[in-house]
Image: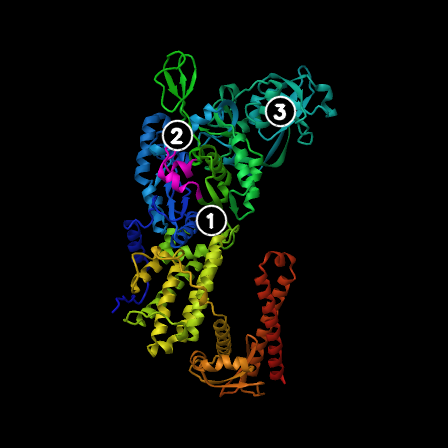
């Protein structure tokens, strides 16, 4: 006797999810084995910020790779998916500084040591929130290998990379104009800037000549920076200003003399063709200043406040307050010529959205071109492949126009730069460990105050997490990783830099494939945001519908290269799908024999059993093919359709008479098919499948440890599929006619089938099933449907059918029904013809798909003819 456990009447996901989450972790089912003889499949999780809480973007980005990891594990791979969190310098600073501000304090007031203590306390208290939420999502992460970008080993790896690159002259320090966020009070790299169109003004200001009422009029979008001007520039070929080359003008409000210089970079079409030059506050002017050896006068500090150099009237003002005051003063002295409306693009901080300020200061840079060259080559040679492929172009666009990377940040939380300065002689030392004294003069040393850009440390994630720079077994087995799944917005922030660092320090690529998922949007295609009020909280959805429903919703919508339009209704629909699976499994368990199963003999298989095995063979192969290409939507649709429509709606209904007769073969096929269904569905819906699987007799420790269902080729049965398809078309058409004429199933009807001898031979053995599933009493095969006022007509596939009813037919309603079906068929024909006339489709689609489309078109045209004939007979 076999042990089987019946399922409860209804499915409650919450206790199921709690139980299996705990079980998977306690049983170490996600822990990889470095000594396994199995082929490996490894990934590293894009580390969420330690400040983070799970949002729908995370849910998508983590669900899709989890499907792949579970699928690979069931295929027999030694899977390792490494989790961890990023220290997120700016985000943590924002949290801590906001808390300090509420107490009337600042980081400067409490000092670096106390600030870092608060940051570590906060990390230890709240930093694990996101990891617990990832566990709720069912992610099969190897938590025994969890890392943090500021843990001791990782920090040492970061320091090692900095020191190595410095000694190779690939890291240098320079006094340079960089982007600074006055709100976050740190420098940002070029790609951390969001460029937005802003409606502003263009101010025209007159710079007079000495001892003259004449002058040069310049146009500017930033009048506050004029206080730091050191020249006026014109194009050397601009005839309007040719006579002024080398002359001097007076800088209004500052009364300094400025040279008029000629330079070919000046745009003659902008404003008046003459521009003010402020080397300390504009990137173009900075380069111009170096070229012409102009003074660099800093009038705006790193906090966006005006400096002493701006003048007594403006010192201490916010930059935008100063702008207003400068304009007022210019107007007072008659040097403001005019103001025009002007729309232009302005850089904003990607974190806090504050307008950035070009800032002149000492910073650290990575000399990026030598690293980028190799990182570009491996993608050109397809050693690393982007999916979808179009993101390769985006990658190249960035890499071909790359600039040196500013890696220093004026923050305290993060990896402090391992550079030390002698306080006596100024000698610079870059070392792994802090020197006890100056290596040059023996004087005291002080460490650089800045920390490294978070993306610098994150660039080491694929190998530093595995123990590098030590030669660990993990590194030997799991590097390079196989897949990186992430968002398009960090292709250059992170993906490109991981490739650079991997090639530099591991002499190998960090991953072989990069899957880029889309953004999660609402049903109006809007980005989810608090201001729009359209945020769907994944944790709320899990509480309401269960984790499996959320996961399946995301996978079913995940088309490579496309953003996702998400609605709660979809989740409700897939919660109903979970219920359907539960109820079908409950039915199977209630109809299983207590006896040990025998070996299934193919000769004993009935049509429904042959058909469901053949369909499962196809679906299993389709799922593997779709997942291999990361077509999650295609795989989801295939398994959904198979379970709901084929297994539940057709197979279980067809075999009910056999089960009532106690047919052991059918019981065993039904059990085997359900087990395989649970295996195929498990990567998508791990909780409900694990729960049901454990109720079935003869199962092991976990469904995750079972083999991915790959039925043998002899399960494929074309004949069974053709016959079942024919029966389904007849039954479906009768049901449609019934529904549209409001004929209840209990009202028995006679069925006329107009078919050939082959169709008759297919249907006759299964008349009982047609009677049961379509509510039919008598069945008659004819060469032509009779002209009968009580005959309701339809076309099942290409077969004409009619059902004879006892009551008089509403001719008007029947005419409208046929017209509606004719219109629908015509529309389907037009769509297929358009596709088959599309050269792009014919080139891209597999030959078998094109052939299927052609065959479907023939069938639809035949159906159209038969429907038209039925309509004609009705109106006559």
Q: Residue furthest right?
A: 239
> At numbered mark 2, what does the secondary structure look like: helix, strand or loop?
loop
Placement of the C terminus among the 4 image quadrants: bottom right
Q: Nearer the viewer, mark 1 or mark 3?
A: 1
Indicate the quadrant where residue 263 lies. Answer: top right
> At numbered mark 3, what does the secondary structure look like: helix, strand or loop?
strand
Q: Earlier in the sequence, mark 2 or mark 1?
A: 2
Q: Are marks 3 and 2 in contact (CB under 8 Å)?
A: no
Residue at 35% x, 33% y: name it: 153
Q: Are marks 2 and 1 in contact (CB under 8 Å)?
A: no
Separation (CA) of disc 1 from disc 3: 42 Å
The x and y percentages for residue 544 are 36, 57
Q: Nearer the viewer, residue 159 or 868?
A: 159
Q: Earlier in the sequence, mark 3 or mark 2?
A: 3
Graded by Cα atoms within 10 Å as few (under 14), some (14 to 19) or many (20 or more), the crowding at tag 2 reads: many
Q: Nearer the viewer, mark 2 or mark 1?
A: 2
Residue that badge 3 annotates: 276
Graded by Cα atoms within 10 Å as few (under 14), some (14 to 19) or many (20 or more), the crowding at tag 1 reads: some
The x and y percentages for residue 515 are 48, 47
Report the span colored magenta. 460-481
In this rendering, the answer to whether 60 lies above or below 509 is below
Q: Nearer the viewer, residue 482 or 87?
A: 482
Separation (CA) of disc 3 from disc 2: 39 Å
The x and y percentages for residue 109 are 35, 25
Residue at 69% x, 25% y: name it: 235
Residue 60 covered by magenta stretch? no
Residue that badge 2 annotates: 415
Residue that badge 1 annotates: 528
Question: Viewed as shown, does residue 352 lie left or right of 593?
Answer: right
The x and y percentages for residue 192 are 49, 35
Identify the mark at residue 451; answer none if there is no mark: none
Residue at 48% x, 60% y: name it: 622
């Amino acid at each position: 006797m076999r042990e089987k456990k019946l399922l409860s009447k209804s499915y409650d996901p919450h206790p199921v999810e709690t139980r299996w989450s705990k079980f998977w972790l306690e049983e170490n089912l996600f822990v990889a084995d470095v000594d396994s003889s199995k082929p490996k499949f490894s990934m590293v999780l894009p580390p969420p910020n330690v400040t983070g809480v799970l949002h729908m973007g995370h849910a998508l980005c983590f669900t899709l790779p989890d499907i792949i990891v579970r699928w690979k594990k069931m295929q027999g791979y030694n899977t390792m998916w490494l989790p961890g969190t990023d220290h997120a310098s700016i985000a943590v600073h924002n949290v801590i500084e906001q808390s300090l501000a509420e107490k009337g304090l600042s980081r400067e007031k409490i000092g670096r040591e106390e600030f870092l203590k608060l940051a570590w306390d906060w990390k230890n208290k709240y930093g694990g929130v996101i990891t617990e939420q990832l566990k709720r999502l069912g992610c099969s992460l190897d938590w025994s290998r969890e890392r943090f970008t500021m843990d001791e080993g990782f920090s040492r790896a970061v320091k090692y990379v900095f020191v190595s690159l410095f000694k190779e002259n690939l890291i240098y320090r320079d006094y340079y104009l960089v982007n600074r966020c006055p709100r976050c009070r740190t420098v940002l790299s070029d790609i951390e800037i969001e460029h937005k169109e802003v409606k502003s003004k263009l101010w025209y200001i007159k710079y007079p000549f000495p001892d003259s009422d004449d002058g040069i009029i310049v146009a500017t979008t930033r009048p506050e920076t004029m206080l730091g001007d050191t020249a006026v520039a014109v194009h050397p070929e601009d005839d309007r200003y040719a006579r002024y080359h080398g002359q001097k003008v007076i800088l209004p409000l500052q009364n300094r003399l400025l040279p008029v210089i000629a330079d070919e970079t000046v745009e003659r079409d902008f404003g008046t063709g003459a521009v003010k030059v402020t080397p300390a506050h504009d990137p173009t002017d900075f380069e111009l200043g170096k070229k012409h050896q102009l003074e660099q006068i800093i009038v705006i500090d790193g906090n966006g406040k005006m400096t002493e150099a701006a003048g007594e009237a403006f010192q201490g003002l916010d930059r935008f307050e100063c702008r207003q005051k400068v304009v007022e003063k210019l107007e007072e002295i008659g040097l403001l010529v005019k103001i025009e409306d002007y729309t232009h693009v302005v850089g904003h901080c990607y974190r806090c959205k504050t307008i950035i300020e070009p800032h002149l200061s000492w910073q650290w840079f990575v000399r990026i071109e030598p690293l980028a060259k190799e990182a570009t080559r491996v993608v050109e040679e397809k050693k690393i492949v982007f999916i979808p492929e179009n993101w390769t172009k985006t990658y190249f666009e960035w890499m071909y126009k790359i600039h040196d990377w500013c890696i220093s940040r004026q923050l305290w939380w993060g990896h402090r730069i391992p550079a030390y300065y002698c306080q006596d002689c100024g000698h610079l030392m870059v070392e792994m460990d802090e020197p006890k004294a100056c290596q040059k003069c023996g004087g005291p040393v002080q460490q650089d105050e800045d920390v490294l850009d978070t993306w610098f440390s994150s660039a080491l994630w694929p190998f530093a997490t595995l123990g590098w720079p030590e030669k660990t077994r993990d590194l030997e087995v799991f590097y390079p990783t196989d897949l990186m799944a992430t968002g398009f917005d960090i292709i250059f922030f992170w993906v490109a830099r991981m490739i650079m660092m991997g090639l530099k320090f591991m002499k190998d690529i960090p991953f072989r494939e990069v899957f880029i998922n889309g953004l999660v949007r609402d049903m109006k295609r809007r980005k989810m945001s608090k201001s729009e009020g359209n945020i769907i909280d994944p944790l709320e959805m899990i509480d309401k519908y269960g984790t499996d429903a959320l996961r399946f919703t995301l996978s079913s919508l995940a088309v490579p290269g496309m953003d996702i339009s998400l609605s709660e209704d979809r989740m409700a629909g897939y919660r109903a799908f979970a219920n359907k699976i539960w109820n079908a499994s409950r039915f199977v368990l209630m109809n299983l024999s207590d006896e040990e199963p025998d070996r299934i003999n193919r000769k004993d298989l009935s049509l429904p059993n042959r058909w469901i095995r053949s369909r499962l063979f196809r679906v299993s192969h389709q799922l593997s093919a779709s997942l291999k290409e990361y077509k999650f939507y295609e795989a989801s649709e295939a398994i959904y359709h198979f379970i709901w429509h084929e297994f539940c709606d057709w197979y279980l209904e067809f075999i009910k008479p056999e089960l009532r007769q106690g047919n052991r073969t059918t019981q065993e096929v039904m059990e085997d098919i359900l087990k395989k269904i649970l295996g195929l569905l498990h990567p998508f819906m791990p909780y409900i499948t694990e729960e049901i699987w454990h109720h079935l007799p003869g199962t092991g420790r976990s469904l995750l440890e079972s083999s991915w269902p790959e039925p043998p080729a002899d399960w494929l049965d074309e004949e069974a599929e053709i016959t079942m398809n024919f029966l389904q078309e007849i039954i479906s058409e009768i049901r449609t006619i019934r529904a549209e004429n409001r004929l209840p199933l209990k009202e028995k009807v006679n069925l006329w089938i107009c078919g050939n001898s082959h169709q008759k031979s297919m249907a006759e053995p299964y008349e009982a099933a047609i009677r049961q599933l379509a509510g039919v009493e008598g069945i008659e095969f004819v060469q032509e449907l009779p002209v009968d006022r009580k005959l309701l007509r339809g076309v099942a596939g290409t077969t004409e059918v009619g059902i004879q009813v006892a009551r008089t037919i509403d001719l008007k309603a029947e005419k409208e029904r046929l017209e509606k079906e004719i219109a629908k068929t015509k529309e389907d024909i037009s769509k297929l013809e358009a596709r088959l006339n599309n050269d792009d489709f014919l080139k891209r689609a597999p030959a078998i798909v094109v052939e299927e489309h052609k065959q479907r078109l023939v069938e639809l045209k035949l159906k159209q003819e038969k429907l038209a004939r039925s309509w004609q007979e009705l109106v006559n």
